[in-house]
């Protein structure tokens, strides 16, 4: 046993450690620890690992590793020194160097143009698959204005000229004078009673379902105070009325169809239906989704937790 190995073994025994304990502490195998205590460094996988294992062993038993290696440097295997080999002088080749530079510049130009072409193709495919402009929607207010603009002209004396009848005296309207036969679209009817929003299930969940009664055209307001991603979709036609990030703005829609709304950051957005605000998940919420379905009358069983 070497002096270094005896010193390490004595320190280990004073600490009350076994070789298995040192193995758990240093991750060094027991057979390597035994070789260090016996001074048999040939078992270790090289002089570098021998010094590293001795240092870890010394630190585990509370000894100064650097001082220990300095005192027993004659016992510890020395690190091998790599011989410095002189590299032969390379003679410059001007012609080959110029040709290489010329080819490298040409190759770099080709790669640059290929890279730009690839970026252009990616942008084209992205724009093709993700159009920014939302699909056109039908505004009920415009339908009303068009109907009023297309009313038949009134005759002198305040009477209205009917389409298929005669003049009516006294300023009364004759059959056929209140409708435009050329307009094939019917104006959506407004709700006949007070608007009622009935939540179906727990309103604090990520997705909230509402029944909106009575059926008819309702006014939706999307009020953004801050910044949030907003998707507002007409479920009847599948048209996305909003599909973008909004910041400090208000969007207003009038619809009679079922509606799907998705909010990226709900605390920054307030949704109102005919002036009634929907629950937005509170300050701790993040995203929120709504499914709003128009019905004639609310369901009998609802849960408004």
Image (tube, rainbow, N blue to C red):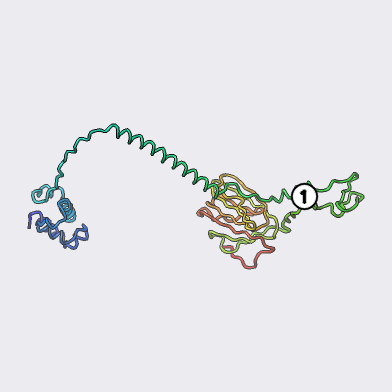
Give whichever of 141, 195 is nearer the camera.
141
Of the pair 61 and 254, the residue shown nearer to us: 254
Q: Is residue 111 above or below residue 295?
A: above
Horizontal arrangement in the rendering, residue 166 relative to residue 24 (left or right): right
Q: Is residue 34 above or below residue 127?
A: below
Residue 146 lies, in percent from the top left, at 75, 48
Q: Is residue 83 left or right of residue 235?
A: left
User: Farthest right residue?
Assistant: 169
Q: Which of 123 and 35 lies nearest the eye of the viewer?
A: 123
Find the residue positioned furthest to the bottom.
301
Residue at label 1?
Answer: 147
Instruction: Please tell me in which quadrant of the rendered image residue 38 appears.
Output: bottom left
Image coordinates for residue 261, horizontal then vertical, percent = 59, 55
Q: In this view, does 60 lie above or below 155?
A: below
Crowd tier of the residue under label 1, counting other residues whose Cα lies within 10 Å: few below 14, some 14–19, many 20 or above: some
> Which residue does the image show at 53% across and 60% down from the upper left?
205
Quadrant location, the C terminus: bottom right
Residue 191 visible in image: yes
Q: Is residue 144 left or right of residue 54?
A: right
Tell me: 118 left or right of 212: left
Q: Residue 100: name its quadrant.
A: top left
* Residue positioned 61% across, 65% down in the render: 302
Q: Where is residue 191? Give x, y as percent.
A: 72, 57
Residue at 79% across / 47% down in the picture?
150
């Amino acid at each position: 046993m070497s002096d270094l190995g005896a010193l390490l073994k004595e320190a280990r025994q004073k600490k009350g450690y076994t070789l298995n304990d040192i193995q758990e502490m240093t991750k060094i195998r027991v057979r390597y620890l035994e070789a260090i205590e016996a001074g048999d460094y040939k078992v270790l996988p090289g002089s570098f690992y021998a010094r590293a294992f001795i240092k870890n062993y010394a630190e585990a038993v509370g000894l100064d590793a650097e001082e220990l290696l300095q005192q027993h440097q004659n016992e510890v295997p020395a690190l091998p020194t790599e011989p410095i080999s002189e590299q032969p002088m390379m003679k410059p080749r001007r012609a080959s160097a110029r040709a290489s530079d010329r080819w490298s510049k040409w190759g770099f130009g080709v790669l640059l143009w290929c890279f730009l072409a690839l970026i252009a193709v990616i942008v084209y495919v992205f724009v093709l698959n993700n159009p920014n402009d939302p699909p056109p929607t039908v505004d009920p207010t415009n339908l009303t204005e068009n109907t009023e603009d297309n009313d038949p002209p009134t005759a002198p004396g305040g009477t209205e000229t009917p389409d298929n009848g005669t003049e009516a005296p006294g300023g009364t309207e004759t059959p056929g004078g209140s409708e435009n036969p050329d307009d094939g679209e019917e104006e959506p009817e407004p709700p006949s009673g007070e608007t009622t929003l009935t939540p179906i299930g727990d309103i604090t969940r990520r997705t909230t379902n509402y029944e909106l009664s009575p059926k008819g055209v309702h006014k939706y307001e999307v009020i953004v105070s801050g910044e949030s991603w907003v998707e507002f979709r007409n479920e009847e036609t599948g048209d996305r009325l909003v599909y973008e990030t909004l910041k400090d703005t208000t969007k207003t829609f009038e619809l009679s169809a079922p509606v799907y709304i998705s909010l990226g950051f709900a605390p920054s957005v307030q949704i109102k239906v005919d002036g009634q605000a929907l629950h937005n998940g509170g300050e701790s919420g993040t995203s929120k989704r709504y499914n709003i379905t128009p019905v004639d009358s609310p369901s009998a069983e609802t849960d408004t937790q």
